[in-house]
Amino acid sequence: MEVSYLLFILMLAVFLGFELINKVPATLHTPLMSGANAISGITVVGAIALAGSGEQDLAQWLGAGAVALASINVVGGYLVTDRMLGFFKKKEG
């Protein structure tokens, strides 16, 4: 594939993602983030499979890096989601 074709797809995905996120009402951001965290969990599973494949050293290093970054994304996403859900809890007092 040509680089220009891949860049076109990347720019289209960025624009579409930006437009979709801006159109989501505030009440749906928490469920949307939870869904994104689930997708990142799938990424962790794929990265673990790549890191443990026993292939070339580069694949193992890239897999280990992907596991680390996706894990940070999942944990951070769940922490933010938990904090956002805390805003909807009734305050005692």
Image (spheres, grey):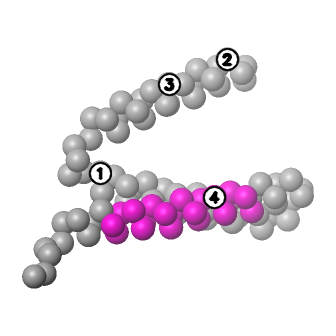
Could you tell me if residue 38 is visible in this image? Answer: no
Q: Which residues are magenta?
A: 64-83
As measured in the structure, the alpha-carbon distance from the residue carrying label 4 to the one carrying label 1 is 22 Å
Nearest-to-viewer mark from 1 and 3: 1
Query: Label 4 vs label 3: CA separation?
Result: 24 Å
Residue at image coords 77%, 54%:
62
Tell me which residue sits at (42%, 66%) in the image: 78
Which residue matches tag 4?
69
Chain-order first, disc 2 or disc 1: 2
Q: Residue at x 50, y 25 (%)?
A: 12
Label 3 is placed on what type of residue?
Leu
- The front one of 85 and 14 is 85
Q: Quadrant of residue 48?
A: bottom right
User: Circle 1 sits on which residue?
Assistant: 29
Q: Mark 4 to mark 2: distance in Å?
A: 27 Å
Mark 4 or mark 2, earlier in chain: 2
Task: Tell me the residue that label 3 is attached to.
Answer: 12
Residue lying at the far front of the rendered structure:
93
In what element is the residue under mark 3? helix
Where's residue 64, x and y in %? 74, 62
Q: Quadrant of the C terminus?
A: bottom left
